[in-house]
Amino acid sequence: MASTMYERVGGEAFFRSLVDRFYSRVGSDPVLRPLYPEDLEVPNEHLRLFLIQYWGGPHAYDERRGHPRLRMRHAPFAIGLAERDAWLHHMLSALAEQEVDQEDGAELAEYFRITATQLINQAASRPR
């Protein structure tokens, strides 16, 4: 029996597909696109490796980039409610296109909701 989310959803292939679907949306999003470099391949790899590691897969993210320090890594970018909402919309849309058990999908979605909200760094935009 698979013991980690990484194993249950099918490993790297699942996360590669999820992140590719997400970034295909980011590329044309007027709110998010300005926050990313012209070439989306590097952020794609970073997010994919992070999610793989977070959900129980290999620790390639730590090996290449060190501790994730999500708030610190996102501090240079103005992230308000609009950015959070756009990011979450695209990630949840990408997740909805994946074949995933309902319970695992709900757990992934909840993590994305919580984490996206935690990365808001514009004080006027923080939810109460």
Image (spheres, rainbow, N blue to C red):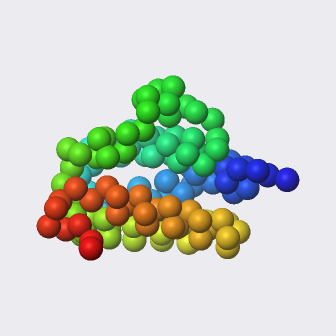
Which residue corresponds to the image point at 63% horizontal and 35% vertical from the top-left? 58
Which residue corresponds to the image point at 60% horizontal and 49% vertical from the top-left? 55
Residue toward you, 44 or 58: 58
Where does residue 15 sit, x and y in percent of width and height? Answer: 58, 51
Which residue corresponds to the image point at 23% horizontal and 67% vertical from the top-left? 126
State how many labels appear.
Answer: 0
Question: Does residue 78 show up?
Answer: yes
Where does residue 31 sit, x and y in percent of width and height? Answer: 23, 64
Residue extending farthest to the front is 128
Where does residue 43 sit, x and y in percent of width and height? Answer: 38, 43
Residue extending farthest to the left is 124
57 left or right, relative to 108: right
Which residue corresponds to the image point at 45% horizontal and 46% vertical from the top-left? 47
Residue extending farthest to the top is 63
Q: Quadrant of residue 12?
A: top right
**Quadrant location of the C terminus?**
bottom left
Where does residue 71 sit, x and y in percent of width and height? Answer: 32, 46
**Location of residue 59 with respect to 93 vertically, above or below:** above
Residue toward you, 113 or 22: 113
Residue extending farthest to the right is 1
Question: Does residue 90 show up?
Answer: no
Residue toward you, 45 or 70: 70
79 left or right, relative to 44: left
Q: Quadrant of residue 107?
A: bottom right
